[in-house]
Amino acid sequence: MTINEETTEAPEYAAVRETTEGPVYHVSGGDWEEVLGDAQHDDRMVINMGPQHPSTHGVLRLVLELEGETVTQLRAVVGYLHTGIEKSTEFRTWTQGVTFVTRADYLAPLSNEMCYCLGVEKLLGIQAPPRAEILRVLLLELNRITSHLVFIATGGMDLGATTAMTLGFREREEAMHLLEYLTGLRMNHAFIRPGGLAQDMPEDWKEKVLEFCKIMDKRLPLYDKMFTGQPIWRNRLKDVGVLPLDACLELGITGPVLRAAGLPWDLRKTEPYSRYDEFEFDVPTSTDADSWARYLLRLEEIHQSLRIMKQVVKMAEPGPVMVEDKKIAWPAQLSIGSDGMGNSLGHVKKIMGQSMESLIHHFKLVTEGFHVPPGQVYTAIESPRGEIAAHLVSDGGTRPLRVHLREPSFVNMQAMPAMAEGGLVADLVVVIASIDPVLGGVDR
């Protein structure tokens, strides 16, 4: 191939750059094997894995230094999904902030809402009614199941097991249908509000929940048959991405990654909230500290979440799902009209035609919001990925002065170099999947 009149053939390689660590090759085309064969033992390549790589799901970039197929150095580059959620909440009322934080970790939106609302309630000095607390537990555990199913589905897909993807998303659809039936939305629900819930559950919610639990109890054994007992699946995960307990503690790792290293740290047990101390459930742990243990642990957590959901059906008692204080409760007296939307025509007729005071109060509550006493608070709960917390600062106004989320995906990703360096590139895919990061939370 001629490049120009003075050059009759293309260079053997794209380019070579000398560094303090040796020559760095920029390789392209079909000369990969030739370059590897010519490279000296101490030569290393720096390549990008992502953000367009399928295993990083288009939103995470990993800068890898490779010696052959071995990862010698890993640097994670984030920010490709940055949304400015935390900053945006400063320009909305406290209640409107729920619609922003729910979009951070988009696979566990209800966990985002829960920690935020617990913080607002702590600043206000209020507590959600007992029925609202128990129904919050139902939603959180259902959301935990959907999140772990995505872990199995996408993790299997990254390893080439398309059956894992089809099975995982099949069961997740069952859970998403139930979430939509209970809250009105599949994702980004904004259903948990400061003071309680947006509205009560449908009349037949107990039957729907038990039906879902029955379906899951029937289908979950298939996962043990298809994956737990599958030699290829086990060999790809076993002894890969090992992170011992001392490393987890030094890096601040929480959630399944920490419990897979042997520490039964689960905020639902260690620092109960929303009546979790009234439920009977186990916190699965392992001492293997590898990707295989994390898979087994999350699968067992699905069983425990189903166990909790069945208890919610028995424990839920009648009562309000929002605090009685009309200066805080929003939306006020929400009910569904014949068109399937709220508010009901009866409530609209009352505030529009019978009580000017009600109309004024409703207007100011929606547009201006309620005042929150000055102060700051930190509230943490157990999300599917670990400890998620909200640090809220109020100056006494109707809008937050500062909102910061302690996002478990962001913290847990610190462990990626420790898990991957020294291993193969193929095992790096397993490491990413076993951490189960959600970049919406990382880049919030």
Image (tube, grey):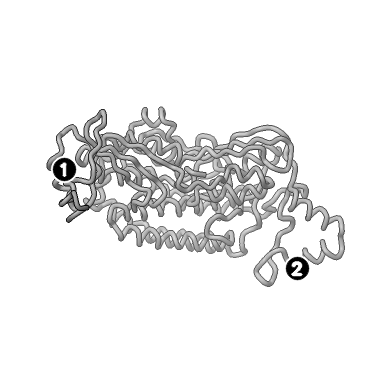
Q: Residues within 10 Å of mark 1 (few under 14, many from 20)?
A: some
Side of 418 where 336 appears, left or right: right
Instruction: Give the secondary structure at mark 2.
Output: helix
Against 336, residue 326 (above or below) is above
Measured as percent of width and height from the top left, residue 409 is found at 45, 41
Q: Quadrant of residue 378?
A: top right
Question: Which of these two is toward me, 434 or 80?
Answer: 80
Measured as percent of width and height from the top left, residue 6 is found at 18, 49
Side of 23 where 214 appears, left or right: right
Against 185, residue 231 (above or below) is above
Q: Amino acid at mark 1?
A: Leu
Q: Which callout, 1 or 2, points at the residue further toward the start of the chain?
A: 1
From the image, tell me which residue sits under label 1. Answer: 36
Measured as percent of width and height from the top left, residue 201 is found at 62, 59
Q: CA distance from mark 1 to mark 2?
A: 73 Å
Of marks 1 and 2, the one in the foreground: 1
Q: Which mark identifies residue 55? A: none
Instruction: Give the secondary structure at mark 1.
Output: helix
Question: Which of these two is toward me, 343 or 175?
Answer: 343
Residue displayed at 53% across by 48% down? 83
Figure quadrant of the N terminus: bottom left
Residue displayed at 27% across by 45% down? 237
From the image, tell me which residue sits under label 2. Answer: 345
Measured as percent of width and height from the top left, residue 238 is found at 26, 43
C-beta proximity under 8 Å, tags 1 and 2 = no
Side of 186 where 227 appears, left or right: left
Q: Residues within 10 Å of mark 2 (few under 14, many from 20)?
A: some
Q: Amino acid at mark 2?
A: Leu
Which residue sits furthest front?
5
